[in-house]
Image: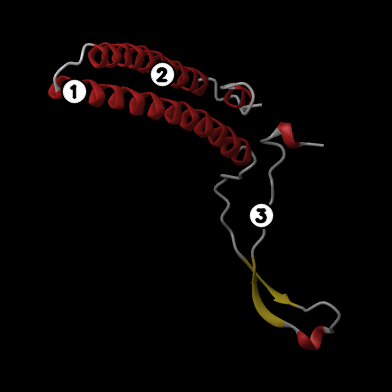
Amino acid sequence: MAAFIPGAGQIMNRKYWKAPLVWGGIAWCISLIDYNTSALIQARAELILLEQNQANAYDLQQARNEETFYRQQRDVSWFALTGVHLLSILDAHVDANLLAFDVSEDLSMEFAPLIPAGQGPQAAALGIVLSWELNRSKHPKFTR
């Protein structure tokens, strides 16, 4: 959902406070794009006017530098918008995967004989068995 509707992944994960941050970041990037595009149009118009009036080399170079600056800033603003959107997707994905992560205080470890499959008890060896169990009572979303 987060890929199609910005902030929807945060809402689906019940992290409601994150959705306005995503929307604010996107609104900020869009306002930067709008500002830099307007300034770029104005800088280009000024550059064209200076070239038509055959202004001195210093003024032309200043106008070219200004046009280049606003073009680069507009492009960076588009990259920032893409970055904010991708980060919101990544955040929603990580949050969704961590919803089922067990954070209980039970960090017990158990020693048990390790018997390789297809062999008898004579092939038993000492080993460490690590097992993770999802506590489904804490996460009703994942119960079946």
Classify 139 as above or below 120. Answer: above
- Give the number of the disc on residue 132: 3
Q: Is residue 106 above or below residue 97?
A: below
- Looking at the image, tell me whether mark 1 or mark 3 is earlier in sequence order: 1
Report how far apart the C-alphas of labels 1 and 3 lie in the structure. Answer: 64 Å
Of the residues tagged 1 and 2, which is closer to the observer? 1
- What is the secondary structure assignment of the residue under circle 2? helix
First of labels 3, 2 by sequence position:
2
**Amino acid type assigned to the residue bearing label 1 in the image:** Gln
Label disc, if present, on residue 129 of the rendered structure: none
| Tag 3 secondary structure | loop
CA gap, disc 1 to disc 2?
A: 22 Å
Secondary structure, mark 1, is helix
Q: Residue at x 50, y 34 (%)?
A: 87
Q: Which residue is mark 2?
A: 33
In the picture, measured across the screen, residue 86 lies left or right of residue 112, that is left
Which numbered marker is on residue 62?
1
Seen from the viewer's position, the closer of residues 60 and 96 is 60
State how the image is colored.
secondary structure
Q: Is residue 57 above or below residue 113?
A: above
Q: Do labels 3 and 2 touch, CB within 8 Å?
A: no
**Residue positioned 39% across, 16% down in the render:** 37
Query: In the image as oriented, which residue stretches furthest toward the bottom?
Result: 122
